[in-house]
Image (tube, helix red, strand yellow):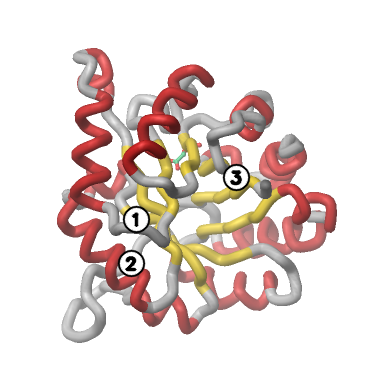
Amino acid sequence: MKKLIVANWKMNLSRQNGLNLAQELADKLTAENYKKSQIIICPNFLYLAEIQAIFSGSKIALGAQNCSAFEKGSYTGQISAKQLADFGVSSVILGHAERRNYCCETNKIIKEKEKIAQKFGLLPIICIGENDEEKSSNKTEKVLKKQIKECCPENGFVLAYEPLWAIGKKSASILEISKICSLIKKIKNVPVLYGGFVKPHNANDFLNLENLDGILVGGASLKSSSFLKIIESAE
Ligand code: PGA
């Protein structure tokens, strides 16, 4: 089965560097890569139009890093799921740990966003994960179950397990990830991704894990050399 490889550029890359990176990926990805994996790139909103043009004719899909919980109207500064769909965006990351932390995004808000995203044909990639303290007090299972119960619809979405203690710091172990995948799939039978310090040297371990359906990559997706190495590790 194809693995899903999602790049989350976050608020990184200048316009020119973002466009160069998108062009390099479109030029360098091969039929063999596409046979093994499905690739989604999530740049910041401002680059979507130009990157959509670069990706047209390639098999790279365009994703967004967030969307509004509202359908339309007087919501200054927000971007709707429908507006994203108009730009050829096919999926959206929701409930990323950074948004939960810095933007006070709650499970309730994430659920609202997820409904709107599905309504306009976007695949929600819903992030869940425990923080350091929850992990050390053995609350991981409880936290994940609550997040799944409160944020997720019945079906038609992807779950990304992204423990907060792992993002940008150190990856979870294969054993931990495998255990969590089994737990998640018992609750919701949906594709599960892992995110948190996925790098060229460890991507192969994750992409080979049978019950894991793919990865969400932050820092290592910002350079074509490292991201292409990660994609190439899919077997
Ligand atoms: P990282 O980020 O790969 O830089 O750890 C992952 C993410 O936050 O999605």
Q: Position of residue 193 (x, y in %)?
A: 49, 41
Q: Residues within 10 Å of mark 1 (few under 14, many from 20)?
A: many
Give the residue displayed 64% in from the left and 25% down from the top.
Answer: 205
Residue 112 image point, x, y percent: 21, 65
Residue type at the position of mark 1: Leu
Q: Secondary structure at mark 3?
A: helix
Q: Residue at x 73, y 56 (%)?
A: 25
Q: Is residue 211 left or right of residue 189?
A: right
**Callout 2–callout 1 Cβ contact below 8 Å:** yes
Whether the residue under disc 2 has CB within 8 Å of ligand 1: no
For disc 3, the marked residue is: 221
Above or below: residue 118 compared with residue 164: below
Taking depth in this image into account, of 181 and 100 the one nearest to the observer is: 181
Of the numbered discs in the image, which one, if any, rests on residue 67?
A: 2
Question: At which x and y percent is residue 202?
Answer: 63, 25
Q: Earlier in the sequence, mark 3 or mark 1?
A: 1
Q: Amino acid at mark 2?
A: Cys
Mark 3 residue type: Ser
Which dot, 3 or 2, sits closer to the camera?
2
Ligand 1 within 8 Å of disc 3? The answer is yes
Determine whether, in the image, residue 97 is placed left or right of residue 22: left
Which residue position holds label 1?
A: 94
Q: Quadrant of residue 116?
A: bottom left
Q: Marks 3 and 2, Cα distance to the nearest angstrom?
A: 21 Å
- Whether tag 3 and tag 2 are in contact, CB under 8 A, the answer is no
- Cα distance, mark 2 to mark 1? 8 Å
For residue 57, which quarter of the picture?
A: bottom right
Q: Is residue 89 above or below residue 125?
A: below
